[in-house]
Amino acid sequence: MATGLAGVFTNIDTDVLVARSIAIERVPLDRLSAKKTDYEAKKTVVETIESRFTHLEDLIDELRVLSDLRGVSVTSTDRDIVSATGQAGAGEGVYQIEVNRLATSERHVHDGVQDETAALGAAAQFVYTYNGQTRTIQTAATTTLEDLVGLINNDAGNPGVKASILEYEVDASHVYHLVLAGTDTGDDYDITIDAGTTLTGFDASAWTETLDAVDAQLRVDGYPAGTWITRSSNSVTDVIPGVTLELKDTNAASPVTVSSTRSTEQLKTDLGNLASIYNGIVETIDAYTGYDEDTGNAGALQGDSTLYGLVTRVRSALTGAQTGFTSDNDTFMMASQIGLEIDRDGVMEFDTSTFDDAVESDYSSVLEVIGALGQGSTDNANLQFSKAESVTEAGTYDVEIDYDGGGGITAARIRKQGETTWNDATVNGTTISGMVTGPEEGLVLDVLTGGTSETISYEVNVKKGFAGAVYDVLDEIMDAVDGAFVTKKNQIDDAVEDLSDQIETLEDRLLDIEERLLAKYARMETLLAQYDAQRGAFEAMFASLDAMNNNSSSSGTR
């Protein structure tokens, strides 16, 4: 950068002149910078709205699977004997629980030594087996009982045995006893002191089994009569579906009653949260895309219709009749019928009274309209809907089945209603499966009774609740590759990058202009300095000529 002389000879503040010139030249640059700041603010807003959609997707994901919606409240009449908890999907029922035995872990106690800090003897081996794994502990001549505890507990291959020391004086020579405790309960977790033990005084004969590893024994509703259900743990999760029993004491003579009753509180909370999150999204979009007449402030995304389009897609998935539901087969077909609806102002409301009435009327149908996934129905009792997978498109399908003279299936075809092309189905005995590459992929039907030498047409409905429908919309919107938010942010990033390039070009241009102006004024000052020096020389010369002329005049007068 050139250095100016800042008006040394002209008394003109050239720095001010340069600054004013640059300020004029900076106007386009300032506009670009402001535009870049606006785009960066837009991206922040988009990310804010995206996070709200993420919260909505997370909640909807928890609502779209029917088995997760069935809430229960589980109680026990004697929690000191059996306590119980329920998980989503647990069934309703009352169960009588008898506990004959608790599961225990094994304990072995050594006869004892006189001093826990005294060496146990010559170098040797202590060998034991637990859970089918044999471990050999090598001792040295200086190893004490305390050291042996550490060697066992710190063994990297320890299969699950905890060593400790019990102080109890049997006699003067037997005070400190090594205790080996299994960390697992059940019959399979025995501790064995092996014959390979060479540590003096620690062979199998020096040990007492104080607690045997055994399985828990229980009955449910008197079953199985004359014997017991056995489990290796006192935490039993696979006897009553969805219910965990914690066995704490025995009560074979007096069963404990465990009750699993319907609870819709969590579902009501989730649906209320759904309304709140949805309304929060709408309010946020309104704030950032609208104009506040009171303050005169415009939102960062004023006039952007893209985000409203996303809300419209979510709303459409919620408000209409759900795919695969029919008035003939289903009590409820729409979210509004169970209390979740959107009013004229676009506000979602959850009416708990309507929901409670719907639950009382048809609990299963309420759950289905929310989270039916893989459920369906047929229009003929002779064709049974077996299952559908998550990949199966919801909707109504036409099915044709050809039967031979003996009633066997010779061929079957499936097509989604509205389509003109049939897809050949796979036939395996009386089971019909949809084509893997078609919308019916994962659909399985069973023929209970067919025809003879004829083709019979059927109609099959594959259901998807509104949570599944909304999730599909959100999954597309939130796609990490080409979803709406990724696309929007990429567009903003491209605009910011382009503006940054323009700004950099203008900044380089301004630096060049500033250098040229400074150099220009510097040359002017230098030139004026030269002129000033020449003026001094001329003034001196003229002064000398004046003196000579004055001298000449004086001489002539005399």
Image: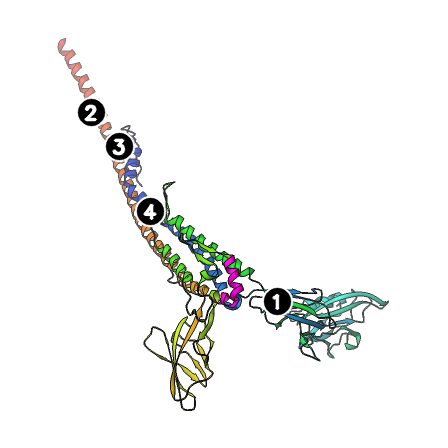
User: Residue lying farthest left?
Assistant: 556
Q: Amino acid at mark 2?
A: Phe
Amino acid identity at mark 1 = Ser
Instruction: Tell whether label 1 touches label 4 (CB within 8 Å).
Output: no
Residue most toward the bottom? 405
Q: Which residue is mark 1?
A: 260
- Image check: 541 left or right of 321? left
Magenta region: which residues?
A: 352-368
Q: Is residue 115 visible?
A: no
- Separation of disc 3 and disc 1 at Cα? 98 Å
User: Regarding mark 2 in the picture, which secondary structure is present there?
Assistant: helix
Quarter of the figure with the C terminus: top left
In the rendered image, residue 248, in percent from the top left (x then y), is placed at: 70, 67
Instruction: Return the disc, 3 or 4, that comes first in the chain's sequence.
Output: 4
Q: Which residue is mark 2?
A: 538
Picture residue at 17% right of the left edge, 14% below the top? 550
